[in-house]
Structures are given as structure tokens and as C-alpha cells.
Amino acid sequence: MSVPVDPRIAELRGRIDALDEQLIAVLAERVGVVREVARHKTDEAAVRAPDRVEQVVAKVRALAEAHGLPPELVEKVYRLLIAELTALELASVERRLADGAGAAG
């Protein structure tokens, strides 16, 4: 037996669901751009780019503060996102290099 949900809670959950959809769409767009960037990178150092990572983290922490979000939370989310996308980029670069080596051999 389900418990009745307050109409206001149901409305707010609907807004959260709509925001989640927007977040996923923006995230998918970001991943697409990362994949495009990966096509222009030629080695692991270019993919890992620690200076760029710290630049992005500093930027999103500042944005978080400006929007009233906990910067620590946003940093954690972005560091996870960056780690996962770095792995995606590395795999892409490694595949491309392997394909190139195979074609040359």
C-alpha cells in the first residue's frame, strides 16, 4: 500500500525530474565536446592536462559559490566527471594510436 504524497511534493518532484533531464542533456553535450577535443590530442600528457583540470575545478568552485552551492560538492562532482572523461579520452587516443601503428606496420 503506497502512502499518499503531498501535492506540493509531487509538483516539486516533477520539477526535479525536468531539471534532471536538462542536466543529462547538457552533460551529453559536454561529453560530445570532450570526444571532439580528444580527436585533437596525441598523447597521455595532453589528455591528463593537470593544469587544465585545476583551472576547471577553480572555475566551477567559483561558479558554485556564485550560485549558492557548496563548492566542495561541486568540486567532488567535477573531479569524478573529469576522471571518467579522462579515461574516455585516453581510450580514444590509445585506439587511434594503435590503429595508426597497425596501419603503418
Image: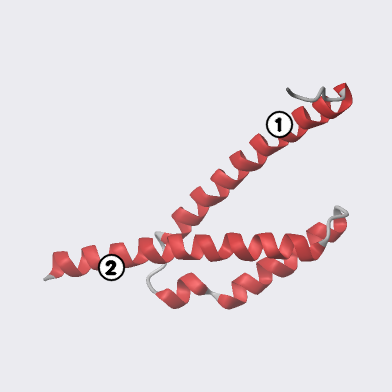
Q: Amino acid at mark 2?
A: Leu
Q: Which mark is residue 97?
A: 2
Q: Nearer the viewer, residue 76 or 40?
A: 76
Give coordinates of residue 100: x percent, y percent: 22, 66
Q: Quick one: label 2 or label 1, which is nearer the N terminus? A: 1
Q: Quadrant of the C terminus?
A: bottom left
Position of residue 59 in the picture relative to residue 94 (left or right)? right
Q: Which residue is mark 1?
A: 18
Q: Which mark is residue 88?
A: none
Measuring 84% from the left and 56% from the top, which residue is drawn there?
A: 69
Q: In the current view of this chain or complex, which residue is farthest to the left? A: 105
Q: Quadrant of the N terminus?
A: top right
Q: Nearer the viewer, residue 95 or 36?
A: 95
Give coordinates of residue 89: x percent, y percent: 44, 62
Position of residue 22 in the picture relative to residue 32 (left or right)? right
Measuring 67% from the left and 71% from the top, which residue is drawn there?
A: 55
